[in-house]
Image (spheres, rainbow, N blue to C red):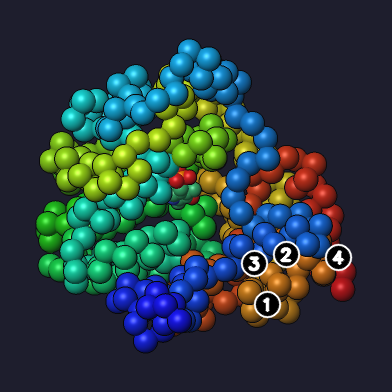
């Protein structure tokens, strides 16, 4: 056995991550529910509504701009903070949609997806023992990165079906040891949009305890009613907020991994010092293509959201007809459904059996929750609806078999 795979020599972050269910119990390999479910889908020919990636291309202008950039020779390392054409488009986008002013040269950083923006931010700003607050369930990368940085992860529960956090629980979670508060709205895996009062309370608490707000807004353009409210637009927030987004979800280009962050210059400098030695740079020809996408007219963004909303409605109707209780998402790629009314109290077990029972694959919400807090979310399953309408119709018909058992 090498040091690396010897359980007794696990490094502290591996022990923390294993305890959080992010690594195998021996702390060595990544926890496998997503991989397990995708493998199950391909083995059984089930419809994979587990992982959240679209099965259709986004705007042609964006795809063509990338092809043109390759043809034009944009194939070498771009500048470390990102190509000016993209940084300027990001600054324009923040002003156009939200009235947020950002200096493209000093307050915008291009990253390898939102994932690298999160990683570089957390690694740059969290020291051993610093507390980081997130809502829970939460996107799995947060807990893994907090553990890797030596931070202490504190969570505020969101409860099915309306997912609204309790202000007292939020107030209790944020204190003098809090270094970061990570907000994710619209939210994965629940599809919830945090209301203005909650966002306002986060800003107030962050100011009181001098914490930095990190906001993951990758679904900013996939809101089904109304428009996205970025927390950085609230009074007092801009100077302590790192806003993270990505072209992947907005333009159905998840494989391109072009993300970014917008923050005060001193935070960008600190984060760039880490990012420089993670990927350094990525995706040269994709950067001008995402810039072109960000400058597309309003109706392109509205059409994408309307299109996705229609998909949501098809899958929602199918899940309800099958006998699930659902939380109708206000945004994003996913619906959370409660399998308890169908007699399944364990979502993970249902997900393992679902290909056999109905030819569909989902992911248990327990994958987004610490093991010791899984009871409240035990019977919940997440299904992706960022798939072609006919695929969702087929999935809905298959799911009807569950109710007919
Ligand atoms: C998809 C997703 C990400 C990752 O975005 P990339 O640009 O692909 O790295 C980050 N946060 C949330 C909430 C997501 O759903």
- For label 1, the SS is helix
Circle 2 Cα neighbour tier, 10 Å, few/some/many (<14 / 14–19 / ≥20) = many
**Mark 2 highlights which residue?**
40
Whether residue 89 is visible, yes or no, is yes
Does 291 sit above or below residue 19? above
Q: Pointers 1 and 2 in contact (CB under 8 A)?
A: no
Question: Which numbered dot is residue 349?
Answer: 1
**Mark 4 highlights which residue?**
401
Residue 198 in picture, x, y percent from top left = 32, 55
What residue lies at 53% left-to-right and 15% top-to-bottom?
Answer: 71
Q: CA distance from mark 1 to mark 2?
A: 13 Å
What residue lies at 19% left-to-right and 69% top-to-bottom?
Answer: 128
Q: Is mark 4 within 8 Å of ligand 1?
A: no
Q: Is residue 253 left or right of residue 202?
A: right
Image quadrant of residue 38? bottom right
- Depth check: 216 or 258 in front? 258
């Amino acid at each position: 056995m090498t040091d690396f795979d010897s359980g007794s020599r696990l490094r502290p972050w591996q022990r923390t991550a294993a305890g959080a269910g992010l690594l195998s119990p021996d702390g060595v390999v990544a926890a496998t529910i997503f991989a397990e479910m995708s493998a199950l889908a391909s083995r059984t020919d089930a419809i994979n509504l587990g992982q959240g990636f679209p099965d259709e291309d986004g705007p042609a202008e964006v795809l063509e701009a990338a092809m043109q950039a390759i043809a034009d020779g944009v194939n070498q390392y771009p500048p470390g903070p990102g190509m000016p054409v993209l940084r300027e488009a990001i600054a324009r986008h923040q002003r156009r949609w939200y009235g947020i002013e950002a200096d493209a040269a000093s307050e915008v950083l291009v990253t390898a997806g939102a994932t690298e923006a999160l990683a570089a931010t957390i690694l740059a700003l969290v020291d051993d023992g610093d507390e980081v607050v997130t809502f829970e369930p939460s996107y799995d990368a947060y807990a893994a990165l907090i553990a890797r940085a030596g931070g202490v992860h504190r969570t505020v529960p969101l409860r099915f079906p309306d997912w609204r956090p309790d202000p007292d629980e939020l107030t209790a979670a944020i204190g003098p040891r809090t270094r970061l508060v990570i907000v994710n709205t619209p939210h994965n895996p629940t599809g919830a949009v945090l209301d203005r009062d909650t966002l306002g309370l986060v800003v107030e608490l962050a100011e009181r305890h001098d914490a930095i707000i990190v906001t993951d807004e990758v679904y900013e353009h996939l809101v089904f009613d109304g428009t996205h409210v970025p927390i950085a637009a609230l009074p007092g927030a801009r100077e302590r907020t790192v806003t993270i987004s990505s072209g992947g979800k907005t333009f159905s280009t998840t494989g391109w991994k072009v993300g970014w962050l917008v923050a005060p210059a001193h935070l960008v400098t600190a984060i760039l010092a880490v990012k420089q030695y993670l990927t350094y740079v990525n995706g040269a020809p994709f950067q001008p293509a995402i810039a072109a996408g960000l400058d597309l007219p309003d109706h392109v963004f509205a059409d994408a959201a309307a299109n996705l909303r229609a998909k949501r409605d098809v899958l929602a109707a199918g899940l309800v007809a099958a006998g699930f209780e659902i939380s109708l998402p206000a945004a994003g790629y996913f619906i959370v459904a409660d399998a308890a009314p169908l007699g399944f109290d364990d979502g993970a077990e249902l997900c393992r059996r679902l290909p056999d029972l109905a030819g569909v694959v989902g992911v248990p919400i327990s994958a987004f929750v610490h093991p010791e807090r899984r009871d409240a979310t035990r019977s919940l399953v997440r299904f992706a609806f960022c798939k072609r309408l006919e695929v969702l119709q087929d999935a809905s018909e298959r799911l009807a078999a569950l109710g007919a058992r």
